[in-house]
Amino acid sequence: MRKSAYVAFDKQESRAALLFIAPAFVLLAVFIFYPMFRALLISFQNFNLISAQASFAGFANYGKLLQDEAFGASLWHSFYFTIIVLPVQTAISLGLALLVQKKFRGVGFFRTVYFLPVVVSFAIASTVFRLIYNKDYGMLNVILKGIGLPALDFLSNPDISMLGIIALCIWRAMGFVMVIFLAGLNNIPESLYEAAHVDGAGAAQRFFRITLPLLKRTMAFVVIITTMDALKIFIPIYITTSGGPAGSTSTVVHFIYETAFKQMNMGYAAAAAFLFFFLVLIVSIVQLRLFRTDVEY
């Protein structure tokens, strides 16, 4: 009798769980899974937005992408952006987290100030930085001229335009990453630092022997989300430079946008999107394996 009642209760719990999951699954199916499946089909077609006809192209779009210099350049720009942003943003955010972790008067104020850029939308931040970078009346060049340095044209010089966007993105995201690191630092037992201090370990030794090893999982999370966000950067590119000058800031996502909605070649853009998706997936898997750890605390 008890066994049958337990089985009935277990089935009732399972049904209740399915009912709670169903709305989320329906939303994912309608707005995520179906569009992805539809886009995958389109990537194998000659699909033009202004034409009612679509013909099967097989792997022609993918083959063409591998020979497309514009796509190759945009891929390089995306990885170049990521290679610079990832270590610099991670180091700055970890440094800020170590600073605001300490207990001192006004620490809440500094935590708020460092986190404020995260609240600002990317569109607004990009617009403000576009004004700051302006060669004629931008605040940055006013300061440079005031201290006797030559003006820099971040938006029109192909050699430094990407660096201006990198500075913008690091400024906006470092507060969010700082909070993640702060949570990881607060989870490390203080007793470990006290024991190391008693054994004569200095600040640098405690950082490299205790803090970094025990932050490995947090670091893995930060590295993976930073990599994905950096690779798919679009809004700052679109607002500040529109991929210019001379295509020097055109990333893969910007290339996909231009191909799909300006050249109206949706099939080619969908192929580029899926090829990029698989590249990002491979990078994420490699990062997960590199940061795999058995350290527990």
Image (cartoon, helix red, strand yellow):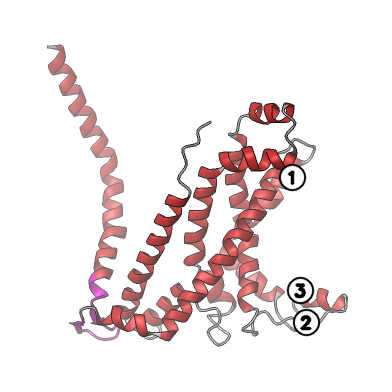
Horizontal relation, residue 154 to residue 29: left or right? right
Q: Which residue is mark 2?
A: 151
Count the marks: how many? 3
The disc label shown at residue 140, or none: 3
Q: Is residue 104 above or below residue 7?
A: below
Label 3 packing within 10 angstroms: few (<14), some (14-19), many (20+): some
- What is the x, y in percent for residue 155? 64, 81
Find numbered disc 2 in the image and state the secondary structure of the residue it sits on: loop
Can I make out residue 233 in this image? yes
Find numbered disc 3 in the image and state the secondary structure of the residue it sits on: helix
Can I make out residue 108 in this image? no
Q: CA distance from mark 1 to mark 2?
A: 34 Å
Considering every residue shown, the one lying at the far top of the view is 1
Hey, what amino acid is under mark 1? Phe
At x 55%, y 66%, the residue is: 83
Hey, what amino acid is under mark 2? Ala
The disc label shown at residue 136, or none: none
Q: Looking at the rendering, in which quadrant would you find the N terminus? A: top left
Front residue of 130/197: it is 197
Q: Which residues are magenta?
A: 41-57
Hey, what amino acid is under mark 3? Leu
Horizontal relation, residue 285 to residue 62: left or right? right
Whichever of callouts 1 and 3 sits on the residue coming sooner in the sequence is: 1
The disc label shown at residue 109, or none: 1
Q: Is residue 121 above or below residue 239?
A: above
At x 75%, y 84%, the residue is: 136
